[in-house]
Image: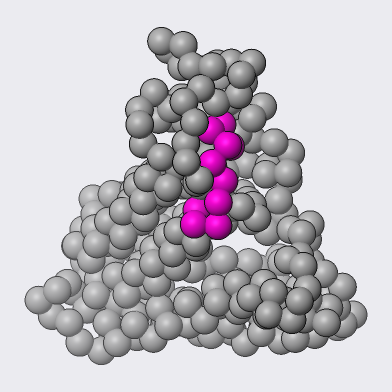
Amino acid sequence: MAKPAMLPEAGPTEAGPTEAGPTEAGPSITRIREVGQPDSVIGRVNAEHWAGRLYMRRFSPYATRLLLRTSISANGVTWLMIVSGVLAAAVLTLPGVVAAVGTVLLVQCQLLFDCADGEVARWRDTLSPAGVYLDRIGHYSTEAALAVALGIRADGGWGSIDGWTTLGLLAAVLVLLVKSETDLVDAARARGGRAVLADTGSPPGAAGMHRLRRTIGFLPFFRMFIAVEFSFLALAAALVDATAGSLVGTRTLLLVFLPAVAITAAGHLASVLASSRLR
């Protein structure tokens, strides 16, 4: 999950906020929520994943309290997020429903660490551009690797790599394009001497583009490549495979996924260019 303007780290402090320095059990969950989950984080329209708001932010303070009792830095937690995501993709290349369940669980671990790294950074007051950078690397690498893994799985595994893997690689390139289209807005604004936009929702744009966004909002295929949604879809496809005794579920998912990401990349580019973000 993307983070606010500045994230992990810049030299951790020992005690965190003075009102609730660590005890033997660690700071209180209530205090961690106050410091680590401010409204500016929970209310982020585009950066806070729905699963974070729905359930993971309820559990992440408990993980954060455990992490605060160790010497691991906020960036170290982000590395755990990256490893969890890459492992999720690696597991997906294995056959069977159990592997797909493993991918779902590892993606949930990634989401947990994605919440906890920012909470650790805010508690220790170690927000930094390095944390933002690592967080982006984590999401880029996970979501691209999952697309490739789907292609390998559709081919039947590492021992039979063929055309389906090529489609997975193409899908991964399109996933990276979609994500870079978003991040390059900030890069372009910085190069042009403009401030980074606040994450408060869709910026003003052409009326037709707003109508299009509202329309496709009812069929959110443009979220298929996000790790949480992707892992659930991959599990559903694995269940279809198991029922059919073939790879029809996984291959159908890939055939739907590829054009969906292509349409998303084209639509997102048009949305950026039609909006006020680059003006």
265 up-or-down from 247: above or below: below
Instruction: Give the quadrant of residue 17.
Output: top right
Instruction: Give the quadrant of residue 123.
Output: top right
Dominant secondary structure, magenta? helix
Please indicate whether residue 98 sits to the left or right of residue 278 in the image: left
Residue 182 locus on image (x, y percent): 62, 73
Rendering colour mode:
one colour
- Furthest toward the left, the residue is 159
Residue 235 locus on image (x, y percent): 36, 57
160 up-or-down from 232: above or below: below
Verify whether residue 123 appears in magenta: yes
Please indicate whether residue 93 sits to the left or right of residue 19 in the image: left
- Whether residue 98 can be seen here: yes
| Magenta-highlighted residues | 122-131
Residue 25 locus on image (x, y percent): 42, 12
Looking at the rendering, in which quadrant would you find the C terminus? bottom right
Residue 277 locus on image (x, y percent): 78, 76
Q: In percent of the image, x 31 and y 60: which residue is there?
A: 86
Q: In percent of the image, x 63 and y 75: which residue is there?
A: 187
Verify whether residue 262 appears in magenta: no
Q: In percent of the image, x 36 and y 36: which residue is there?
A: 72
Please indicate whether residue 34 sits to the left or right of residue 106 in the image: right
Q: Nearer the viewer, residue 97 or 84?
A: 84
164 up-or-down from 230: above or below: below
